[in-house]
Amino acid sequence: MDYLQIKGGAKLQGSVSISGSKNAALPVIAATILSDKEVTLTNLPNVVDIRTLLKLLTMLGAKVTHEGTQAKIDNSSIHSTKAVYEIVSQMRASILVLGPLLARFGECEVSLPGGCAIGQRPIDLHLKALEAMGAKIEIIGGYVRAEAPDGLRGAKIIFDKITVGGTENIIMAAALAKGTTTIINAAKEPEIVQLCKMIRDAGVEIEGIGGSELIIHGTDRKTLDFQPTKIIPDRIEAGTYLCAGAITKSAITLTDVNPEHIRASINKLESMGCTFEIGNESITIHPPQTIKPVNLITTEYPGFPTDMQAQFMAVAVMANGESLIEERLFENRFMHVGELNRLGADIWLKGNIAAVHPVKALYGADVMATDLRASSALVLAALVAEGTTNIHRIYHLDRGYDNLEGKLSALGADILRLKEPARS
Ligand code: UD1
């Protein structure tokens, strides 16, 4: 197993290219199931989650050629519609194959993802919506078994809660359904917009793209024919590098980024004293000498993303006053608090609110990554901690950050990936 060793205190400088978005790529890969022709995807990030989903498709019978940032996926040879526990338990987003498998093949079995470090994360809303579209669903032996022998039909879906994965599953299912599906209270994330455009470019009429009411005119076709699709930049990776600039008080430039997608993070960093130069596909952060505290509440896009909460908490630790951070999406997404406190932070939790008190300095220590974004918060804190920090269990980071140590070290950080010593 690998760990990261970071010696704190280095100033960063230069520019970093932002990779394709993991969370946009996953539904796009799942959507290729709706086609029986080869689909070309470009700008894929080099992260474990992408390889895991491609492996799942291969297990279903797809032919996948994956090299660097490009994949060619041919789903004409799918011979199984069962997404097994071994894969789904590694990555919850595997549930995204449920909608497209059911829509194309009229049946499928997908392992229930279960909870994870950040919370219970049920999929009840996905299932309820598919049932409204005519699917018969049973939970047997830890699997969701879904059937729609006569195909899915359009329906009016009102999500009780805004769900990114649920919205994506229903968009994909609705594309091949008979009749019109209306999704009310749909998620509006840029990843949803990318999925809608990919499906629209395959000839499916979709109204309201980017809004909270989506109308998908089902094609009643067996399959779709997709254009080559370039994955949008990763807004969470981009936000994380902005936080790296802010916490180390270094001016750095992000390239290959969509500044519009990171408005919420930029606004909060501005309130902490940072200034920005914003281009079409680039952004330079100029941090202040003294970071101001911040109050933030996580919410759905275009609000402040839960996936940036941990990184902002790391930056807030170095502010000159108390910050309040409220997590509204995931009940247990504060696993990084204990680890940040091991580095010398002074964070108090009450329910879903963290009070971050200022400290003079952080000090290197051994810490443990607990989930993907919590891990990057530890990396950020380690960049300014005095001495050496060893971050263990970084397989969480590898799920979602493309070459994090390479990119940070090119910016000037003192960061190494090392092997844990073998235990006897
Ligand atoms: C996606 C992102 C994840 C991000 C999250 C919220 C991917 C691969 N993952 O996760 O990085 O943190 O959006 O922005 O894109 N819920 C239910 N029932 C359901 C579905 C969801 O109660 O059937 C709840 C969840 O527990 C959570 C909230 O709704 O409290 C939002 O979850 P959702 O938007 O579905 O998150 P994911 O799609 O899993």
Image (spheres, helix red, strand yellow):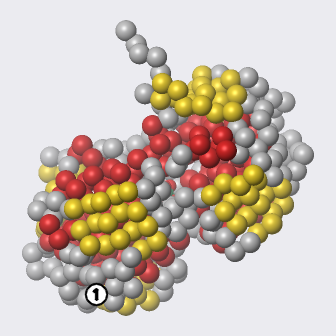
Type of the residue with mark 1: Gly
Depth check: give the residue in front, 235 or 172: 235
Residue projecting furthest to the right: 289
> In this rendering, is residue 148 above or below 267?
below
Location of the C terminus by quadrant is top left
Q: Image check: 176 left or right of 119?
A: left
Mark 1 highlights which residue?
218
Question: Looking at the image, is 417 positioned above or below residue 21?
Answer: above
- Ligand 1, by image quadrant, is bottom left
Residue at left offset 62%, top offset 65%: 256
Q: Residue at x 89, y 45 (%)?
A: 290
Q: Residues within 10 Å of mark 1 (few under 14, many from 20)?
A: many
Percent coordinates x, y for residue 197 in the rendering: 44, 81
Displayed quadrant of residue 271: bottom right
Q: Image quadrant of residue 321?
A: top right
Question: Looking at the image, is 147 positioned above or below residue 91?
Answer: below
Q: State the SS at label 1.
A: loop
Total marks in image: 1
Query: Residue at the location (19% across, 53% down)?
Result: 59
Q: Is residue 165 visible?
A: no
The location of residue 325, given as percent across then percent down, is 68, 48
Percent x, y for residue 129?
A: 30, 71
Image x and y of residue 389, in percent: 65, 26
In the rendered image, the vertical position of residue 91 relative to residue 73, given as above or below? above
